[in-house]
Amino acid sequence: MTELERKHDRTPVPKEWAYAPAPESRDVVSLDDRYGHFVGGTWLEPSETYTTISPASEEPLAEVGQATPEEVEAAVAAARDAFENGWSGISAAERAKYLFRIARILQERSREFAVLESLNGGKPIKESRDVDLPLAAAHFFYYAGWADKLEYAFPNRRPRPVGVAGQIIPWNFPLLMLSWKIAPALAAGNTVVLKPAETTPLSALLFADVLRQAELPPGVVNIVTGDGRTGAALVKSEGVDKIAFTGSTDVGKAIQRELAGTGKKLTLELGGKAANIIFDDAALDQAVEGIVNGIYFNQGHVCCAGSRLLVQESIYEPVIEKLKRRLTTLRVGDPLDKNTDVGAINSKQQLEKIRELVESGEQEGAEIYQPPCRLPEKGYWFAPTVFTNVAQSYRIAQEEIFGPVLSVLTFRTPEEAVEKANNTPYGLSAGVWTEKGSRILWMAAHLRAGVVWANTFNRFDPSSPFGGYKESGFGREGGRHGLEPYLQFASAEVKG
Ligand code: NDP
């Protein structure tokens, strides 16, 4: 027997190389049985409630309020009172201090928030821990820095706050969207009424505790929970000076119609159908990672997801082969397991929408690929999916699926890539993979998208403005640009 054979004899080779479970503890989060609305610094007992659940297990987590129009009005009145009797009068440097405090507290409590975000929303803990939380804190830090520099940001324009901002956010990045909305609004001197999405209210409600810790004056931030009816009441409220909305294009259009002629300011961050474009000179392994990150990050519940893959014809086969191989290594399952790559679909309703669009893709003639994976029995799940043989006219190439579903198309020349990429009612983001800097610049100049990533995808930074063209909405969030919607200038009044 050789030395090597003897060694093998002593070290049993595991039959299975599966990952051991690595669950994050839930103990760090303590939930109340029931939550009210956070109005004027205290909890308002809700007249109606509903149950919010964990989409991974369908387990009920808490009862939360379904705010009526009267309750929304109480929140708007609290925000108005705080605006007129304090917040708009304090020095900008004081405002900055509160924002810094909020940022620091979010960092200190980041584990608690990350667990709650994954529990209520279904996203993998490694994403909420490494992306949502650091970015949310970074937004507050960033806008804290601007609060006392508005005169420099907008020289000779005498910036003033708008007043009360009504903010409506979706369920895909609950805390991050909250920070994108609240941080610039407060930095600019406004007060806020925020409505989180019906399915993911818990991190916003926990955020109320951060405001208490930061000793933010009562009424500066108010949080009302509920479904679309609560959002609609906030939009209609006469006491609101500005609406900031992130969500579907249909609801965005309805809000725009509602506000037409009222003189209220409006910014809309809506859907997308981004093209991720791979040229034949790209580093293919990196590009495949970028494709995976572009569409399977957060289960594809990302408005700027790279949901249309455009591959140059000459490298189609190796790209698809590498992509399929990579998909077999994605781990779908418990969002609180640190090894999970793809978590739960956010709601039953969203799962049904994904299924319906995927069925339409198969019926229209596209070829479907899903890696072998066992999905949990309880909860809402969808396996990572790739469609090849996709024609531009198919619904899966046109409509926002908002799930882990990629549609692959091909192109031959840069001009054809641009034409296909721009052939969508949306215009939020795009990705370009090539080693040629000149081609990146040419593509970026011709792609009709608010953000164009080069040799990367889904990168965010608070200093970088984000927003869309066409049916992806208008207005920018992030950066100095993100302050502008929350300000009025000496020459322009908000209400006519
Ligand atoms: P919505 O646009 O309905 O939701 C976004 C937010 O608006 C939520 O807080 C929602 O409340 C609220 N809302 C709903 N109706 C109204 C209304 N009439 N007036 C004011 N506010 C309202 O998106 P859905 O959650 O229904 O998702 C549907 C589709 O939208 C998804 O499949 C996806 O394609 C797209 N979407 C895009 C997002 C993006 O970031 N671009 C984000 C979310 C969804 P409630 O949660 O109670 O419905």
Image: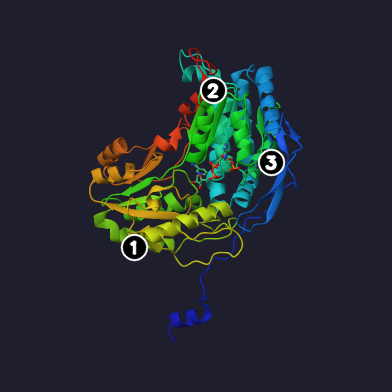
Which label sits in the foreground, 1 or 2?
A: 2
- Whether pointer 2 and pointer 3 mark residues with C-beta atoms closer than 8 Å, the reply is no
| Residue 96 position in % (x across, y down) | 59, 25
Q: Nearer the viewer, residue 236 or 303?
A: 236
Identify the residue shown where x is 43% and y is 63%. Answer: 370
- Of callouts 2 and 3, which one flags the residue occurring earlier in the amino acid sequence? 3
Q: Which residue is mark 3?
A: 66
356, above or below 37, in the image? below
| Residue 247 position in % (x across, y down) | 52, 40
Q: Is residue 215 visible?
A: no
On the image, which quarter does residue 147 sit in?
Answer: top right
Q: Is residue 233 visible?
A: yes
Determine the CA span between mark 1 and mark 2.
54 Å
Element assignment for label 2: loop
**Mark 2 crowdedness (10 Å alpha carbons): few <14, some 14-19, many ≥20:** few
Which label sits in the foreground, 3 or 1?
A: 3
Q: In what quadrant of the picture does the N terminus appear? A: bottom left
The reply to whether the residue tagged 1 has its Cβ within 8 angstroms of ligand 1 is no
| Residue 374 position in % (x across, y down) | 53, 67
Q: Which residue is mark 2?
A: 262
Which label sits in the foreground, 2 or 3?
A: 2
